[in-house]
Image (cartoon, rainbow, N blue to C red):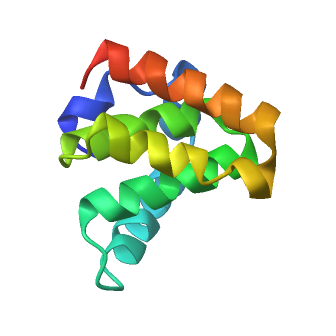
Amino acid sequence: MTSNDEGKLPGTYKAFIEKFPALGDAHEAVGKAVDQVGPLDAKACALVKVGISLGAGLESALRSHVRRAMQHGASESEIEQTVLLGMNTCGLPRTVAAWQWAHQQIDRGI
């Protein structure tokens, strides 16, 4: 997690890791480890996580991974395609919701 992300974390998440710092550290360590396991670069990993967040219906996570994808150079069209890839698998309503969440984050910028 970058210091850029620190101020944008949801309050509930901040409260959880403040109460259980060892779990927050473990969560962050696992995230870093899996990002480094294979050949995907940071942008590709963030885009994959956008898709996973869409499938799971996780609005906060999707916004976070859109922001991270943008920080790593993803374009609006790359983010949109990532979201649209969920349409046949996850359905139109979930894809439209994710598209809205992504665009709200894109409009906010990094």
Residue 43: x and y in percent read 28, 57
Q: What residue sits 48% from the left and 60% below the top? A: 48
Q: What residue sits 43% from the left and 27% below the top? A: 9
Q: Is residue 77 left or right of residue 49?
A: left
Q: Residue 75 occupies which quadrant of the picture?
A: top left
Q: Residue 62 occupies which quadrant of the picture?
A: top right
Q: What residue sits 26% from the left and 46% below the top? A: 74
74 vs 48: above or below? above
Could you tell me if residue 53 is visible in this image? yes
The foreground one among 19 and 68 is 68
Residue 67: x and y in percent read 34, 34
Count of marks placed on residues: 0
The foreground one among 90 and 5 is 90
Could you tell me if residue 65 is visible in this image? no
Q: Is residue 72 left or right of residue 64?
A: left
Q: In what quadrant of the picture does the C terminus appear? A: top left
